[in-house]
Image: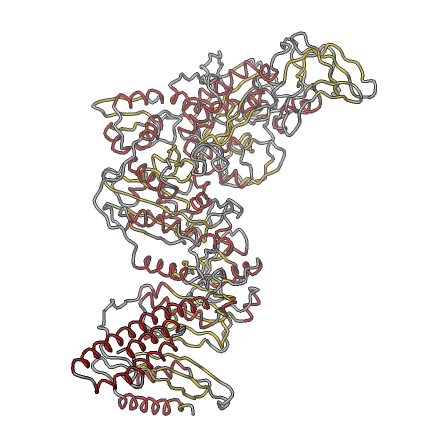
Amino acid sequence: MEASLKLLNQYVKVDDLSAKEIADQLTSIGHEVEGMHAFARGDKLVVGYVQEKVAHPDSDHLNVCQVDIGNGQVQQIVCGAPNVDAGQKVIVALPGCDLGDGFKIKETKIRGVESNGMICSIAELGIDQRLLREEDKAGIHVLDDDAPVGEDALKYMGYDDTVLEIGLTPNRADCMAMISLAYEVGALLSREVQIPPLKDLNEKESDIQIDVETDLCPFFGAKLVKGVTTKESPEWLRTFLMASGIKPINNVVDISNFVMLETGQPIHMYDYDKLKEKRFVIKTGFHQKAKLLDGKEYEILPEDIIVSTDEGIGCVAGVMGGDDTKIDDNTVNIVVEAATFHGASLRNTARRLNLLTDASQHYIKGAIDTANTPRVLNRCAALLQELADAQEIYQSVMTPYQVEEKVITLSTLRVNDLLGTSIQTEDISHILDRLHFQYTLEDELFHVTVPTYRNDMSMDADVIEEIARMIGYNSIPSTLPLMEMTKGALTPVQSQTRWIRHLLADLGLHEVITYTLTSPSMVNDFNLFHQGDSISLMLPLGEERSVTRKSLIPSLLQAVNYNLAHAQKDVFIYEISHTYSQDSEIQNLAIACSGMYHDVAWQQLQQKADFYFVKGLVETIFKKLGIEESRYTLKPVEEDNQNFHPGRSGYLMMGQDIVGVIGKVHPRLAKKYDVKDVYVAELNLSILLNLKKRAIHFTAIPQYPAVTRDIALVMDKDIPVYDVVRSICKASRLIVDTKIFDVYEGEHIESGKKSVAIALTFQDASKTLDEATINAAIEHILNVVKKDYNAHLRA
Amino acid sequence: MDELLKIKEEALLKIQDCSSLKELNDLRVFYLGKKGPMQSAMKSMKDMSKEERASFGQVSNKVKQDITQAIEDKKKILEEKEMLEKIKNERIDISLPGSHLPLGTIHPLSMIREELEDLFIGMGYSVAEGPEVESDHFNFELMNLPKDHPARDMQDTFYIDENTLLRTHTSPVQAHVMLAANGKGPIKVICPGKTYRRDDDDATHSHQFSQCEGLVIDKNITMADLKGTLELFAKKMFGEKREIRLRPSYFPFTEPSVEVDISCHNCNGKGCAMCKHTGWIEILGAGMVNPKVLEMCGFDSQVYQGFAFGIGLERVAMLKYGIDNIRDFYSGDLRFLNQFVRKD
């Protein structure tokens, strides 16, 4: 909200404080001042008197004016405004005056004639153009005849105001009312708050009838005021409204806006003479089109709260009045409405009609002080009498309303227990006094009666917050919880997730975090783990972020693409994230590798991303997690797999379950994501991190030496080497390690065959192996591979 | 006898002149070997008297010893020389780049998350994560945000259906933890994770972001405890010199509620562009758990009380590292990630 300090000063004295001081104070009690600005700008603006006006010799619209600016000084000013005339009191911007946006007044010559200043219009003072009248923009502003020449013009006009931009928290919408805001400042500074007194208006009996036929209107009050004269509001009222961001219209409308500004109670006015039947029925159930006072037609639905007059739409409650009953320049007799409507219901109406008016905001935010309504109606009528010459004021007609007295009990002990402070009972009493909270006190137990405008208070914690605000949050001491010891630790899954994150980073990969929401055109790509349908948003921001992803690979490919597009050609990234579908939540790990991993070219040290590189990463992760090789196998993907290159990809299997995949992105998808050779892996961590793992068990270091023998086997090209090695290991219990050191096809090898060179390491824990034993073992191994794979020793 | 001394003299001279280990070895073989001049001289011993023979023997032993010693000494010198020669030939250009191994990075949001986890784990907190696809009940109702609550306007939500949504904050994890505790304290937990709001992405808004919630519940937890805890947090994340300032605020799930500012780490509170010349930076929201929330989550609010806080991880990272575009976190740009290669 925008709060004028001059208006605030009407209710609580703050004009002895700087705007910055007031802003800091408000911020310190929870009303964050997010910014402030001068209502009008310009520093060297004075009241001037136009002594003489003569036409500019070289122009058909300019005039040369001699302007008295006080202290006997007379400045010559060339003025282009059509309404300037001798004998006027005007606003003069003196040389050096900064009118903002780089517009600085200088001593200059206009078409050869010296001009030392500018005579200003209201529109040139930096006030929001939206708030101004046409005449404010069309010509210079003429001040009253009694304006003191030479004085500060803004001060004289009451334009020397500062506007605070306050970010009210949703619970304190009551502070949209200047009086509530004044109570806050008054409580903090221990200052008196002045509220306009009730006026005796010599009221007559009213013939207005009210029937409330819905629960959504807890209170309705109406007051008839006759004989008003519609005209322009006095300057002070216009200025306050403008400083509060409200455009002045005429005295009657301005009064309703001003009363809402002052009290937080929205006011609506009906033209009494346009009502055939002087009766207001508040009900729902209308379903029709209705023209409202903005001249537009709206569709009313049965759930909308309507103030019905003559069986039509008198007013869409709290939102906007109907066209038939609206006041206009000819209105003489007015019915003033001040009511309470159900905020949530009104919100739906206001939103649907796209009419989130200021008035509706007060209802929506729950800022209405129903108990204060009689006062509000009195204030309205008093102002109509004062400013619109109202002739007759009638008694308010109001539906019965029982003010519910809210009493909250709390003890000094409880206050200190919650805040960790040591506030004394009398300090609490003093704070409650400052806040204008009524209370009784017995044995350090307070029974606090909450003021009716504080709709936010319902329990002791609320009152304690008030006390804390007033002592200042910064005077609360700083301690650490004194409590029973608790175990602080990550869960096993959380720990393992961290290990993987750190392992991959230490191995040279970069962790990325990408968006959960993806496009339906990508959501099924690479998905292996989710069986259920994807989850779609009801109202997404756009198609490309409308469903939750199932696989992380599409996001990683987008990141690869992004980097390629930004000249980063070697991309090694991974992401750990939860993925969601209709029936499951899974923690995924995905890796994407493209380009050169390790490149020290001048040393001929290079490692390119390929299948074996990614496989190695996955095996390293498994090793770190303690998942033994015997627990998983790698099964080639289907020949017709659409996501992964069928010749270069495999599923990681545990029994019948796919727990991951390692492979090359299918060329078709590489094209879709606009990437080149990318090798990827994706693991289902929800399974892998929950496996039962063997504890670390130390095996004694062997006493006897190991012996290594190299063999080269020739076999069919398509035989998986892994199978052969497994056979070899099974064939001799003496083998403790195998290492493949060459795989060769080509010259000297029959076509369709390959030669695989393997180093076999033999060891016996109980003795030194002799030559004969090793030879026998090799002999046996060769027989086995001959039998199983038709593999033979390379000649 | 003179002959021996002559041999010695000659040998020592030759050893001294010798310039390679090979030459030295040849001299050793010549003078101390079976066919050398010493052996020839020894042949005359058989014609000597017993006394003469004894003294000759003594002299010849001494000569052998001296020659051996001289060879040994020379060998050391020559070896040293040869080594120095070798070193000279092995010289490389150490200015050429090291065969560096690639060094990856942990995402800055993970870095902040882990730093927070470690800080709070050290104080006895456990780490709880909840579902990102959450029910309206947990995300809003249990957080004291009933359907018509005006504060729901603050939360622009991605709904999946009427009752399901992408969580808008990590606060619902509080409710999961409290309900699992069955009304029995103490609870000491932090809840880091991803959150979502229906915001268009720009430099300061992201439809996906991360938070870390904290919750402590026991019988005598005070607002002073909250303040002390947050002070520790501020000092850990932004340096020992940091101070915090609490301002009253409003969150439906806490009462009293506070907004927490830290003294600007960029200017030490003097005022700069980063803190908009106020010396303070808004860093997180917190408060004492609203008794209504306690009750809804199965705790007796007459017995238990506690505090909760919610930290925006992007905000912490942006302030700490001077990042000014929130989208950088989610682009996967290596030029961004590579700046977080070092330990912090």
Quadrant location of the C terminus of chain A? Answer: bottom left
Provide residue A628's location: percent of width, then percent of height.
Answer: 31, 72
Residue A793 at least partly seen: yes
B96 w.r.t. A753: above or below: above
Q: How is the image coloured?
A: secondary structure
Provide residue A774's location: percent of width, then percent of height.
Answer: 29, 88
At 51% from the left and 88% from the top, the residue drawn is A747
B58 w.r.t. A519: above or below: below
Residue A583 at least partly seen: no
Furthest toward the left, the residue is B50
A423 w.r.t. A521: above or below: above
Q: Is residue A703 left or right of residue A25?
A: left
At 30% from the left and 27% from the top, the residue drawn is A407
| Viewer-nearest residue: B9 or A738 | B9
At 48% from the left and 36% from the top, the residue drawn is A346
| Viewer-nearest residue: A334 or A556 | A556
| Viewer-nearest residue: B202 or A336 | B202
Which quadrant of the structure image shows residue A434? top left
Q: Is residue A660 left or right of residue B36?
A: right
Q: Is residue B92 left or right of residue A189?
A: right
Provide residue A340's location: percent of width, then percent of height.
Answer: 45, 30
Which quadrant of the structure image shows residue A654? bottom left
| Viewer-nearest residue: A464 or A672 | A672
